Amino acid sequence: MNLTRILRGYVVLLGSVVLSKAIGFATTILLARALGTQAFGVLGTSITFLGFALVLTNFGSDAIGTREVAAAPERSAAFANGIRNLRLVLALPVSLGGLGVAMLLKVPLSIAIPLACVPWIYAFRQDWILVALSRERAVAISAILRELAFFGLAAVLAVRSGSVSVALWCFLAAELVQSAITQWAYRPGKRAGSSPSFAMGTTLRASAPLAFMGVMYLTYTRIDTPLVAFYAGPAAAGQYFAAYGVLFGLLSLVGPLARVGLPAISSARGRSEGEVGDFIHRLSLAACIGGAFLSLLVSMNAGLIVRTVYGGAYAEAANALRILAWSAVFTCASSLLLQRLVADGRQGLFAVISTTAAVVNIVCNLFWIPKFGIRGAALATIASEGCLLLLGMLAYLRRPETGPLAGKMAWTGASCASVWWITTRPEGIGAAWSTLVALSLFLLLVAPLLFEVFRVGFWGKGISRAT
């Protein structure tokens, strides 16, 4: 397994994610301030349901394609054409079904039509194959230009009009930009035609558990906003969606690690199981520590963040953000562990784990939102993410490195929670000093773990064994 390649790919994607998410966050701020809490809640609910549509259009094909092309790059042209055609076939029922549901719910056509068009544009996106071929720079450029397009269009059109439908049309145009760039970036030397190296039926069967898992993933991460809108109204949904926007920015920092990790793990199949497992577990521990650091920082400054970013109208979002921030610990810790299930061909188990987390999230939301409002939705997110990490660890319980990793992650979480409790008790201490003391104490408590993760021997061993 080439550690240098993974780190290089991660740095490239991380840089693009930080920049693109910063631009995307600026767009969110523009729209939140221009639309108001109620219309912003409608926008958040619409984008949530669009996420389900894209998962069904993709149907897990990107993960299967990445895995297969990373293992056998000569099949890239066949898989590029095959997966595009597969997505186009699936986009038809997804779009028509979405329009039908919109008509039943009496959603305005000005909102339903752009939402129904997005799956067709998404079908042509080729970022997955660029990652599989270690061309992360093209993916980074496409993501940044997409966010720039959305920001520019939203600033000129959506902010001026104050319309949800205009914002969604801007979103559609931005999707077109990214799909066009990735299509241009991937230009195979020859067409695959009817190459037998891609079989749509086989791919559908292999990706079905991943598609189901994707639906479950959205259920335990994004269904909160529609449920808040149902129980507490669109204004409360706007508050929650604003808080979740900050959390989504945090989680974007770990996304590239999982994305570049999948092709690297897939290409290492058949090599030393101990080396692969040790590598993944160390990176997972590093991600857990990073997630805990960010959780502590955001939770202690939630009020300041919300007031600065969204303004006084979204003050209630701070209550949700203080709780939501803690879910980043579990999400960062479980990201690579769950990607390893895909690389190992255990998609069925991944689907079971995702289903369990989704059920936990829905049940908790149904009980807690009516009682606690948006804070109940935030608590449900923590419960589902914690369930996901626990089941991901149990999936590799027989591996010798799993037990020690669980103990180190538990120490990281306990250290973070203890430091937060200690530094928020005294009164009269400024927020800046409290945050500084808390972060310093936390780093001191996890310093031995950081030394273990980043010690020279580990990196040297990884590079020397790279192939």
Image (cartoon, grey):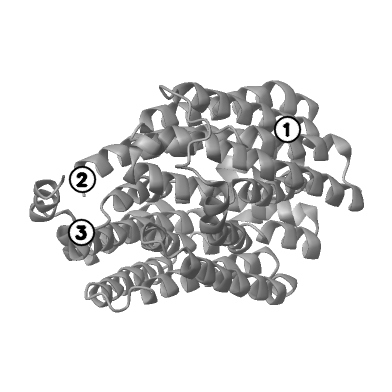
In front of the other: 56 or 316: 56
Counting residues from the start of the chain, the first of labels 2 and 3 encountered is 2
Q: CA distance from mark 2 to mark 3?
A: 22 Å
For residue 450, which numbered disc appears in the image? 3
Q: Provide residue 123's location: percent of width, then percent of height.
A: 61, 36
Q: Nearer the viewer, mark 2 or mark 3?
A: 2
Q: Residue at x 63, y 55 (%)?
A: 317
Q: Secondary structure at mark 1?
A: helix
Classify mark 1: residues with Cα within 10 Å, few (<14), some (14-19) or many (20+). Answer: many
In front of the other: 198 or 401: 198
Q: Provide residue 174's location: percent of width, then percent of height.
A: 62, 28
Name which residue type carries label 3. Answer: Leu
Counting residues from the start of the chain, the first of labels 1 and 3 encountered is 1
**In-image side of 137 versus 384 (left or right):** left
Q: Residue at x 66, y 23 (%)?
A: 153
Residue denoted by label 2: 2
Q: Residue at x 75, y 72 (%)?
A: 370
Name which residue type carries label 1. Answer: Ala
In front of the other: 327 or 331: 331
Residue denoted by label 1: 167
